[in-house]
Amino acid sequence: MRRSPRPGSATSPHKHTPNFYSDNSSVSTTSGDSSGHRSAGSGPGEPEGRRAQGSSCEPAGFPVVSEEQFNLLSTLDLRQETQSPRVFKNFLSLLFQVLSVFLSLLGDVLVSVYREVCSIRFLLTAVSLLSLFLTALWWGLLYLVPPLESEHVMLTISKYHERVRTQGEQLQQLQAELDKLHKEVSSVRTANSERVAKLVFQRLNEDFVRKPDYALSSVGASIDLEKTSRDYEDANSAYFWNHFSFWNYARPPTVILEPDVFPGNCWAFEGDQGQVVIRLPGRVQLTDITLQHPPPSVAHSGGAKSAPRSFQVYGLQVDDETEVFLGKFTFDVEKSEIQTFHLQNDPPTAFPKVKIQILSNWGHPHFTCLYRVRAHGMRSSEEAGDSATGGPN
């Protein structure tokens, strides 16, 4: 059973104060009834039992709010509304930060632009100063150099043209004189060359040996063609001329027995080795052999390269089988064009024939030239039985 309060007992006054500062407080406690009415506390002098009975028996309506509760409610609403100014303050601070960053970037850009403008301004200033300097220099030169119109110092343009024309005529005259002198010098040089050649040929034709020559065709010497090397024939130039009997391009070996020693009038054999056998006009005790070749200064194509260099001399007996070695010699083209070599004929022996064997030349790759060969000695007194071999065949 529920005990009811004593009649006449006074209940201690209980004042219900809501906790407005807690997060879970509410303005009024709501009853969980199905009608959804809100029960409010009674006045301060009202007993607890009556408040309970009044909450169940009082009809639904607006609750009664005291002045103190109303002040507390207004305070609660203000504290809840303070969150929106705080958000706004955060937004303003963020905005200020963005503005400060933007202003700093703008300041950097302005500084770089200012530097560029300063450099361009410096360049413009330098160019202006340079142009002023060049202008002043130009005017100074114009002031220092005398004007062209001065007749006493500089010539006019017409006088310049006149001088140029006069100098051109003088150059033409000098050129004509130089051409004339060149022709005169050429003619003198040609005449001197011909004169020098005549003197050289005259000297070559002179007999400086002062010894009898038994290898001379005019005294009966001849060539044994069977024991002599073949003539050199140039297929490029001599082939055409050799078809004509009246003009034989290749000289025969008999030219070495003639006193005419002109450049090109020689007997040429192929290569650098060959031989020639000379029939003497009788049996001769050979003592010396003389070779003659034009000097390089008057020689034609090939120069002295076709001259013989190393050679040997043999004396041949009547049977043509017995050969007696008479010496080995070297013809030096740097020395005289006529060189005499002493033979090693000891004891002295008379030979009807003499063989000249060429071993090398001075570098010509195709042929070797012999101009004149002389045989010196003493003719034997035994002519009986030798007359057949002594005359030309």
Image (cartoon, helix red, strand yellow):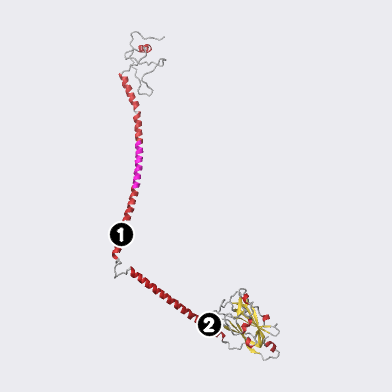
| Relative image position of residue 280 (x, y in whole percent) | 65, 86
Up/down of 235 relative to 94, above or below: below
Nearest the eye: 364 or 160: 160
Q: Secondary structure at mark 1?
A: helix
Q: Report which quarter residue 356 is drawn in.
A: bottom right
- Residue receiving disc 1: 135
Using the rendered view, name the quadrant where residue 231 is placed. bottom right
Q: Position of residue 149 (x, y in %)?
A: 29, 67
**Three-letter code for the amino acid on which mark 1 is drawn:** Thr
Establish if 335 lies above or below 88.
below
> Amino acid under label 2?
Ala
Which numbered dot is residue 109?
A: none
Question: In this rendering, does residue 190 appear at all?
Answer: yes
Q: CA distance from mark 2 to mark 1?
A: 76 Å
Residue 145 falls in image quadrant: bottom left
Q: Visible in this render: residue 271?
A: no
Q: Quadrant of the C terminus?
A: bottom right
Q: Which residues are magenta?
A: 95-113
In the image, taking residue 328 as reference, residue 99 lies left or right, namely: left
Q: Please, what is the dominant secondary structure of the magenta stretch?
A: helix
> Image quadrant for the N terminus?
top left
Secondary element at image label 2: helix
Nearest the viewer among 73 and 254 is 254
Q: Position of residue 347 (x, y in %)?
A: 66, 87
As displayed, is residue 383 above or below residue 153? below
Q: Which residue does the numbered mark 2 point to in the structure image?
A: 197
**Residue ID at (31%, 55%):** 128
Give me the residue at 35% from left, 71% from top: 162
Position of 108 with respect to 188 (left or right) is left
Q: How many neighbours does mark 1 have within 10 angstroms: few (below 14), some (14-19), or many (20 or more)?
A: few
**Of callouts 2 and 1, the N-terminal one:** 1
Q: Nearer the viewer, residue 360 or 148?
A: 148
